[in-house]
Amino acid sequence: MLTRKIILRYRAPGHVRFQLPPQLCRPPAAQELVAALRQVDGVYRVRLGGNKLSIRYHEPFVSFQELARHLHRIVTELERSGKLEARSPAPRRPLLARVKGSRPVLWIRNQLQALRETATAFGILARRGVLGKGGAIIEDPRKFAFEFANDVLVLYLIKVHWHRIVHDWLPHPVRNRYNWAAVFYLTYLLVKSRLPKH
């Protein structure tokens, strides 16, 4: 049984590292293992490098024992499905396909996509009159910068706390009343800053 060959190398609150047998480190099985572990509630980072598997998780949502059971189940399913057996090497991809899939080319594609999205956003701002003649940036650059920074901060806070909001704050509103008070106060301040001043 392959699960007996998995060795726990490090354990701390919210972080574990395992040494995996070679069968679990081959690309198809490794990708499936990492994808399945990322689906576990409470797990927020999974990294597999060489034969080392590193998992970071939120202890309130998943305990070490539950995580170990999930890992055992996933490895057992991979073993039963026959995906861990060595296969003959796949035929090499054509040169053009390998170049298109290389890291530098993918990085350039991602940067171009981000640039396109930024240009689209500026186009929307220009149509709304924010960037144009007499737009908000020209009229009051300090106010525009302040509002922009507020929007970025709000989006960042939502992204960082989303998992806790959904899995902890909503089911237990009384226990998290101070968190909700902070959310309502920040929302009040955001709305108040957007209202026109007389």
Image (cartoon, rainbow, N blue to C red):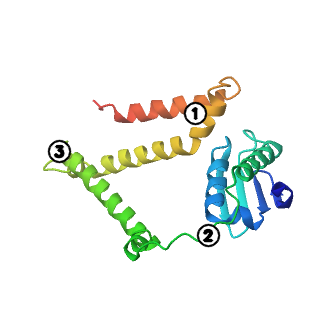
Query: In the image, which is nearer the foreground, mark 1 or mark 3?
Result: 3
The type of residue carrying mark 1 is: Ala
- Quadrant where the C terminus is found in the figure: top left
**Residue on which the image places disc 1:** 182
Quarter of the image for residue 104 reads bottom left
**Which residue is the site of mark 3?**
127
Residue found at x 35% / y 58%: 114
Quarter that holds the N terminus: bottom right
Q: Determine whether the residue tagged by mark 2 lies in a helix, strand or loop.
A: loop
- Could you tell me residue 160's position as x and y percent? 56, 45
Number of marks in picture: 3
**Which residue of the protein is positioned furthest toward the left in this rendering?**
133
Residue furthest right as drawn: 4
Asked whether disc 2 touches disc 1, contact meaning CB atoms under 8 Å apart, the reply is: no
Which residue sits at x=67%, y=49%? Answer: 37
61 vs 193, left or right, is right
Question: In the rendering, at what x and y percent does residue 159 appear?
Answer: 52, 44
Q: Residue at x 80, y 44 (%)?
A: 69
Q: Residues within 10 Å of mark 2 (few under 14, many from 20)?
A: few
Q: Residue at x 45, y 34 (%)?
A: 189
Marks 2 and 1, how far apart at CA = 58 Å
Towards the viewer: 126 or 62: 62
